[in-house]
Structures are given as structure tokens and as C-alpha cells.
């Protein structure tokens, strides 16, 4: 006998303005559940200020203190969180430490959105904003500008609501685009095969600025001038405080998506969090303690595995994304890269944040694309933006890089 679905996810509204909303999740556990929940919250633009995990390997209890937006659609957020939780009827006799029991999700249907209209500053971000509001995920994008001032945008998208195959959902999407862009927009939506999506990939060449391993830790944190981010991160792995669990203690600079990056690492390593607690101090530094076990339910005693986990966590929280501004002939190219989950899911909100930053800088985008590359033996999503010739003369490359970085980190 399980609990009622309405009790799987419970919201407690903030008592006064500026206070966090408390989200309680009470459901059967499964490997990677915390990562999936944090990914949904990042998609909706939440900042997590505090967290509490507890599980016995079959049932979990998670409490999250989050800061939302005035426009947050709480009913929709709850629906997505509930959908990510395992069924309450699935608890009988199943060990959730066994990663092999987790079946890979069915690949979502991919649709091609073709959009043509007159170009203007901020157009790409405005389109992205509409798609985000409609819960349409951008998988790939190709944006090009014609000499007569028109743009042809090709978005390969998936639908969180799984309704884009219906005529009504397609017409609603087109209508929202026309209404919000306030321009003469021609658009069309059609279903495409995975083979067509794969053929949309660009060349495998990437500038050394995005592939060089030393790039990982070279982005300066404006709050720690002159100090690399690695010096602001402390990660300790300890086996002495618990007879059955390995303790991981992390202290680092807080940023948007921090908890997701941590949880993604544990999910990729098939590591279960049995108990954890963390919070942000003075809206700046995050401190979190996690008691973990391997997929077999045992603590991590192998020093090489401990070092590998610590090294991976250090890289993830010190440099969750890569940002570079390079020359591409006479033009300027902005590149942003982030690792994807082993399951194939990319980081949500990156395209939205980058286009927002460029709009704030009053820069026009000549072309844009999202592709997948292998960087340092890991699959990464790479966002490439070719900025219009002559548009960047009034904005230095360092300023572009800083604004994009700060927007992605949620520091502005």
C-alpha cells in the first residue's frame, strides 16, 4: 500500500517575500532520483538554498528549499516532479542499489521547427523564451541570417508534454510564437527521424580554447579576483565516521545548478546517497555533507575510486561549463560547452541563458548551432554563436565572456 499521489510532492509556500518555498518529496527511491529532481528544478529556473536527503535504499524522503520566480507555474512544477518519481507500487522487494534494474528511457520524439522572419537584436532569445514557456526542449539548433536581413531558424525540439504530434499542440505553438514575437513570422513543425537529427551535426573541429584541458579552471570568479575556482573548492572523502557509508564533504562557491552538477556526478558513477544535508551560507558559499554507498550497497574503500570521485566532483563544481570567445576569420565566435549525463540528457537552460546575456550586451547573432562533441573523453553539448561582423567592436571579448559566464552561474 502506497501513499496518495498528491502526497508524493508537497509544496509549502514561503511565509513572506524573500523566503524559500519548501518542496517535500516522499516516494520509492531509485538510483539517480535526486539528479532527475534537481534537473527539473533547474529547468524551471529555481535556486536551491538548502537540501535534506534520507533513504533506506527503498524509500526516500527529500526536502528542498527553493527560490522561484514570480511567474512560476507551481502546478506544472509539481506535475513534472511527480512524474519523475517512481510509482509507489514499485517498492515491493526491489533493491534500488542495482543500477541494472533501471531501464533506459524511451527516446523522445524529435520535431523540426522551421521559423523565418526579419532579424533584430534579441530575436533568438525571445524565440527561446517562448519555447521554454511551452516546455519545448531545444535539442539542436541551426540559425542563419540572409543578406537581406532575414533569419532562417531550424530548431530540433522535443516536447515535455509529449503532445507535439497533435495538430492542436502544433497550432498553439505557432500562435504563441507569432503573438510573442510581434513580427511577420512564418513557421512550420514536422516530425523528423533520429537519422535526420544526427545529420544536422556540424564538423568535429573545435578551437583549442574549448578543448584544452587547462581551460577547465581558467574562468575567474568575480567574487575571488585573481584566484582560480579550484582554490575555492574543498572536497573531502572520509571513511572513518561511518561503519557502512563513505562521507563526502563539499564546500564551494554557490551557483545556479550546483546541486544538479553534484547529483549528476553521483548518478553517472552509480552511487547512492543514503543521507545528505547541505545549505548556502550568506547566499555565497555552499556546504554539503553526503553519506554515500556504491551500487552494491557498500562504502567506497578503494583509494583509486575515492580519488577518481573526488577529482570528478572537483572538476564539476569548479568548472561546470566552459566559455570561450575566439576569432573565426574576421568574426568573433562564442563557444559554450557542458558535459551531458550518461543517459544523454544535456544541461537545461544553457541556450536560454547565453542568448539572454547576448541580448543584454545588445549583440546580434549571425548564426548559432548546438552540437555534440567528445571533449576530454566525455560527451559534451557545444553551443556555437557567430556574432555579426562589426557588432562586437564596442564590447570586448573579456566582457562578453564575463557576462555570459555570470548569467550561466546566476551571479547577476
Image (tube, rainbow, N blue to C red):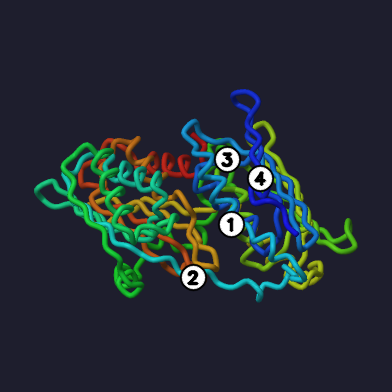
Q: Is residue 45 above or below residue 302?
A: above
| Front in this rendered view, residue 159 or 236 | 159
Q: Identify the element where label 2 is drawn.
A: loop
Residue, far top: 16
Where does label 2 land, which residue? 106
State if disc 3 and disc 1 touch (CB < 8 Å): no
Q: Is residue 307 left or right of residue 37?
A: right
Q: Are marks 4 and 2 in contact (CB under 8 Å)?
A: no
Residue at position x 29%, y 46% in the image: 124
Q: Is residue 84 above or below residue 63?
A: below
Specify the farthest residue to the left.
148
In-image side of 118 versus 351 (left or right): left
What label does residue 252 carry, if any? 4
Label 4 SS: strand
Q: CA distance from mark 2 to mark 3?
A: 29 Å
Q: Which SS class for mark 1?
A: helix
Tag 2 and tag 1, C-beta contact below 8 Å: no
| Quadrant containing the N terminus in the rendered view | bottom right
Q: Secondary structure at mark 3?
A: strand
Residue 219 in sight: yes
Residue occupied by mark 1: 84
Mark 2 and mark 1 lie on one chain; the one further toward the N terminus is 1
Is residue 349 placed above or below 269 in the rendered structure? above
Amino acid at each position: 500500500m502506497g501513499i496518495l499521489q498528491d502526497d508524493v510532492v508537497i509544496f509549502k509556500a514561503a511565509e513572506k517575500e524573500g523566503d524559500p518555498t519548501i518542496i517535500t518529496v516522499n516516494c520509492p527511491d531509485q538510483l539517480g532520483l535526486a539528479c532527475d529532481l534537481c534537473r527539473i528544478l533547474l529547468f524551471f529556473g529555481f535556486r536551491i538554498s538548502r537540501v535534506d536527503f534520507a533513504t533506506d535504499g527503498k524509500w526516500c524522503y527529500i526536502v528542498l528549499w527553493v527560490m522561484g520566480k514570480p511567474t512560476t507555474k507551481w502546478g506544472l512544477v509539481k506535475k513534472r516532479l511527480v512524474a519523475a518519481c517512481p510509482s509507489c507500487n514499485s517498492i515491493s522487494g526491489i533493491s534500488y542499489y542495482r543500477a541494472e534494474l533501471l531501464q533506459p528511457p524511451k527516446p523522445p520524439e524529435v520535431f523540426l521547427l522551421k521559423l523565418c522572419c526579419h532579424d533584430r537584436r534579441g530575436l533568438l532569445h525571445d524565440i527561446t523564451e517562448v519555447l521554454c514557456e511551452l516546455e519545448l526542449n531545444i535539442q539542436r539548433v541551426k540559425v542563419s541570417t540572409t543578406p537581406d536581413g532575414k533569419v532562417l531558424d531550424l530548431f530540433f525540439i522535443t516536447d515535455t508534454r509529449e503532445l507535439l504530434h497533435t495538430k492542436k499542440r502544433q497550432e498553439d505553438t505557432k500562435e504563441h510564437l507569432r503573438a510573442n514575437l510581434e513580427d511577420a513570422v512564418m513557421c512550420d513543425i514536422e516530425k523528423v527521424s533520429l537519422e535526420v537529427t544526427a545529420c544536422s551535426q556540424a564538423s568535429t573541429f573545435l578551437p583549442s580554447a574549448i578543448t584544452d584541458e587547462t581551460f577547465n579552471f581558467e574562468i575567474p570568479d568575480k567574487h575571488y579576483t585573481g584566484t582560480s575556482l579550484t582554490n575555492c573548492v574543498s572536497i573531502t572523502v572520509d571513511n572513518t565516521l561511518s561503519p557502512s557509508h563513505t562521507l563526502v564533504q563539499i564546500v564551494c562557491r554557490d551557483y545556479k545548478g550546483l546541486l544538479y552538477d553534484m547529483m549528476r556526478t553521483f548518478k553517472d558513477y552509480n552511487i547512492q546517497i543514503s543521507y545528505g544535508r547541505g545549505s548556502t551560507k550568506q547566499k555565497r558559499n555552499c556546504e554539503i555533507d553526503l553519506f554515500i554507498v556504491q551500487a552494491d550497497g557498500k562504502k567506497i574503500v578503494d583509494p583509486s575510486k575515492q580519488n577518481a570521485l573526488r577529482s570528478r566532483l572537483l572538476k564539476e563544481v569548479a568548472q561546470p561549463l566552459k566559455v570561450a570567445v575566439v576569432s573565426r576569420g574576421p568574426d568573433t565566435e562564442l563557444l559554450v560547452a557542458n558535459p551531458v549525463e550518461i543517459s544523454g540528457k544535456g544541461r537545461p537552460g544553457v541556450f536560454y541563458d547565453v542568448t539572454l546575456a547576448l541580448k543584454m550586451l545588445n549583440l546580434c547573432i549571425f548564426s548559432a548551432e548546438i552540437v555534440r562533441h567528445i571533449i576530454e573523453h566525455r560527451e559534451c553539448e557545444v553551443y556555437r554563436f557567430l556574432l555579426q561582423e562589426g557588432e562586437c567592436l564596442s564590447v570586448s571579448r573579456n566582457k562578453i565572456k564575463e557576462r555570459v559566464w555570470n548569467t550561466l552561474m546566476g551571479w547577476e
